[in-house]
Image (cartoon, helix red, strand yellow):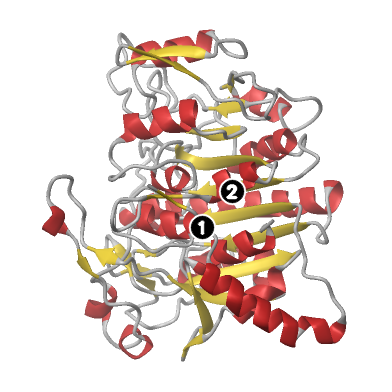
Amino acid sequence: MIVKSRFNFLLTFLFITHLAVWSQTSRKLPVPKNIIVMIGDGMGFNHIQAVNCYEGKAAQVYQNFPVKLAVSHYPAKAGEYEEGNPGSNFIAGGYNPALAWKDTAYLKRDFTESAASATALATGYKTYNNSIGMSVTHDTLENLVQWAKATGRAAGVVTSVEFCHATPAGFTAHNIVRTNYSQIATEMLLDSRCDVIMGCGDPGFDNDGNPVKGSWKNTKYVVDSNFWQNIITGSGKQTQFTINGKRKTVRDIDGDGKPDPWTVVRSVSDFRNLRHGKTPKRVLGCPLVYETLQQKRVMINGETKDSPPQITPQISTVPALSEMSLGALNVLDNNNKGFFLMIEGGAIDWASHANQKGRLVEELESFNAAVEAVIEWVEKYSSWNETLLIVTADHETGLLWGEEPFKPIQEKGKGNLPVMNFNSENHSNSLVPFFAKGSGSELYKMFADEYDSVRGPFIQNSELPQLIHFLWYK
């Protein structure tokens, strides 16, 4: 059963509000041509502040967007879902502002994980932890990529971690548990109608970007070794593949009745060339590295988790997230009806899980650079009248604070890590930031009907796509 995301209750509310408010000013409801959602996985308010202190900045560019809110992201069911064990989840407790600012134990329990939050951000429905596009009753939920394609637009996902990891998967696929990577990759590459998919996972390289000697051992992110070899050698032409003994054909993405092959982009020079000029119709971008663009590279030169950024030189054979994002935009804007694009800074979360201060700064700086590149693209090739840009997070990771919990991060001068401490190696219930600019962005203020004593008005993660569905409703 497919649950169609028409959100009747939302439509009623918004139509009434529109008639009462918007009609008084004779303004038409905006219909953004393009929508870009940028997700800093694990990025809390204090993560951004830590980088501001390190860089000697008052604020990042998105912190000056006209719409500034907070987001609550608790799941419908917390706990870690285990396939075959229906009792592994339990009802989540929501978000309690009073407890959130005095009890770290509260912040450390019943939190969401990336798959459930991505599903909420992509479909408008809160669900159980570890779900990929599935409801609490295991119905498949329509996501924003599907919705964009249904309206004739292009669609894509970009990430700095594996392309079938939780966040990009939540926007493109459906599976009862996020760790079924091979199944998810198969759906993304063969069953989805994505125009662009970019992310890591290449089994032929290690986490330092070095070629793997001998046979590929880790192909879980790319279906299997035969498929991966065939999709590379068949780049731009092969449309049929054999998966588990069954013949499968890639989807038609533009409605001409013909299956559209993936053009595979791998080298850093090819990613950079993709930013300008004519592009292939459909692109699978997979850098020459295994799990992450940079965060998982082996520490050298005495680097520890408390070291400042760049002690270990970054890998030079992979593109930056900003370069991947611009390449994706150059492909997607070929569609004159517009597009939807999700861009994830996925390893902000990974660095926070590992309590790596310097690498957290690196990953967030990479994400910030991608945001700046996207803003420049909007202002050069589009406009804020036709494009909506959202910068947010799926959850907070690491319970990052200053000298102790609930104490502010303290600056120690530009180029120096501030006084900052992780208080967890996992996610937390802390509210995360939400910034929006462009067509329709002001309408998000209508959803902010809950209030936190410190962060102010906040929305639910499931409300992000609900407005998008409404604006694109036909």
Residue drawn 61% across and 20% down?
A: 260
Amino acid type, residue under disc 2 in the picture: Trp
- Above or below, comparing residue 135 to residue 189 in the picture: below
Q: How far apart are marks 2 and 1 (CA)?
A: 9 Å
Amino acid type, residue under disc 1 in the picture: Ser
Q: Is residue 401 visible?
A: yes
Q: In which quarter of the image is residue 266?
A: top right
Residue drawn 63% across and 74% down?
A: 444
Rendering coords of residue 474 (x, y %): 69, 56
Residue drawn 34% across and 60% down?
A: 127
Q: Which is nearer the eye, 310 or 203? A: 203
Q: Quadrant of residue 104?
A: bottom left
Rendering coords of residue 168 (x, y %): 47, 44
- Above or below, comparing residue 39 to residue 255 in the picture: below
Residue drawn 61% across and 66% down?
A: 467
Residue 20 as seen in the image, left or right of residue 340: right
Near mark 1 (Cα within 10 A), the count class, few <14, some 14-19 or many ≥20, is: some
Q: Which is nearer the eye, 43 or 151? A: 151
Rendering coords of residue 118 (x, y %): 44, 54
Rendering coords of residue 76 (x, y %): 31, 67
Lower sequence index among marks 2 and 1: 1
Q: Is residue 65 visible?
A: no
Residue 359 as seen in the image, left or right of residue 323: left
Question: Label 2: which residue?
Answer: 147
Residue 129, which numbered label?
none
Near mark 2 (Cα within 10 A), the count class, few <14, some 14-19 or many ≥20, is: many
Q: Is mark 2 on a helix, strand or loop?
A: helix
Q: Is mark 1 on a helix, strand or loop?
A: loop
Q: In which quarter of the image is residue 145?
A: top right
Question: Label 1: which residue?
Answer: 5
Callout 2–callout 1 Cβ contact below 8 Å: yes
